[in-house]
Amino acid sequence: MERSFFARNPSALIFILLLAAFTLGVTLLSEGFGMDVVSTSMVKTLGKTLCLCLVAVAMDLVWGYCGILSLGHFAFFGLGGYMIGMWLMYERTKAIVISATAGGPLPATPEEIREGIGVQIFGVVGGSEIPPIWYFADSLTIQLALVVLVPGLLALIFGWLAFRSRVAGVYLSILTQAMTLALSLYLFQNDSGLRGNNGLSGLQNLPGAENVPQTLISIYFLWASALALGLGYLLAAWVAGGKFGSVIRGIRDDEARVRFLGYHVEGYKLFVFTLTAVIAAIAGALYYPQAGIINPAEIAPIASIYLAVWVAIGGRGRLYGAVIGAALVSLVSTWFTGGQAPDIPLGFYTVQWVDWWLILLGLSFVLVTLFAPKGIGGLFDLIAGRGSPERHGADLGPDPGALREKEAEE
């Protein structure tokens, strides 16, 4: 009799229960529900943290399980934010233009409203016309579809070109980083159609919800972020389990052998790469309305490097490790860079954590790599008593005498 999904993945059930308890607790303690224990700004921070945990789960699936060290997944995260940001900014600006022209002797025509929107949005970069890429910006349904389609199509094309050429290892990492850099540099240009370095702003203002206070909107986004993280975690756990998960772990450990066994390695890698790009884009679409602004700096290669650091600190190859790493680094970063961490006067020098945080993060990554390669998630293995099986010289392979315990340790 086949066991249920949660019976085969008890950590997934534990994670979902903890996530539900966390979301309920924050909701009840928030300003929006009258307790005033957790501020609205903190609720937004926690909501954004959940989104970062979701993109970390995607990164862990593609890197920790499939062995593809992508240094470009934050580009998909940013593209998801841009797609939903276009609708948010367009509709919000449209409401402002209509309100400003309502007092005129004649109602504004659709052409006049569109011209006003163009001036309001693109006047900052010296333009007044709405670029063609904003053609569907007034349709929430289409923009939500583009959240998935644009990053997914980019990942599909890039992955197909890279994997069919059998680019792997550090060379693939460099290619993903080059893709991210190229996209970032393009978006920095004013004629990109996305306001260049100014990016998209005012995204926290939901069209049609002007009378809804931010105390409640922050809670709604917290719920949406928690739901997305929960579903994304279950999807990643399902993909990583079973025969498919065994194949992608085999690709990670010995790609040549898996190919020799007859598996279409490139197809598996392309599926995982594209799927995780879509998951990252959904996380970005939920993150930036809570952040309120997105600009090309968010897509810079350094952001994807940070993402890899989060997963490494949490413990790659463990979905809950990716969540732990992303949540820990995100919250600690907010504490250090937000001026909450006290400065340390040394007499001859004062340590200001705003300046030293990145150095501390880099040092943590080096220490984890050298002394705790399994990351924080590896501590759960120690607590649970899981480790290498004690075979006492028994065969480790299918053939007698193959890879005995002593040989495997050398």
Image (spheres, helix red, strand yellow):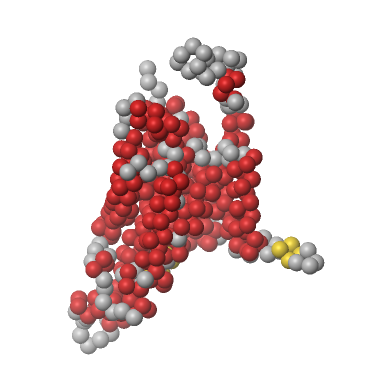
Name the quarter where the C terminus is drawn.
Answer: top right
Residue beneath the point at 42% across and 71% down: 197
Task: Point out residue 192 in the picture as x, y percentages from the top left corner.
Answer: 32, 69
Quadrant of residue 238 within the rendered picture: top left
Left or right? Give the position of 21 relative to 410: left
Task: Point out residue 376 in the picture as x, y percentages from the top left corner.
Answer: 59, 40
Q: How many marks?
A: 0
Name the quarter where the N terminus is drawn.
Answer: top left
Q: Evaluate whether residue 49 shows in this view.
A: no
- Residue 227, placed above or below residue 385: below
Quadrant of residue 288 within the rendered picture: bottom left
Left or right? Give the position of 136 relative to 89: left
Residue beneath the point at 45% across and 60% down: 300
- Closer to us: 201 or 305: 305
- Residue 406, placed above or below residue 309: above
- Name the outermost residue toward the right: 347
Task: Point out residue 87 in the picture as x, y percentages from the top left corner.
Answer: 31, 64
- Residue 9, placed above or below residue 142: above
Q: Evaluate whether residue 168 shows in this view.
A: yes
- Closer to us: 393 or 66: 393
Residue beneath the point at 37% across and 29% down: 258
- Name the outermost residue toward the top: 400
Residue beneath the point at 29% across and 76% down: 117
Task: Point out residue 327 in the picture as x, y percentages from the top left corner.
Answer: 54, 49
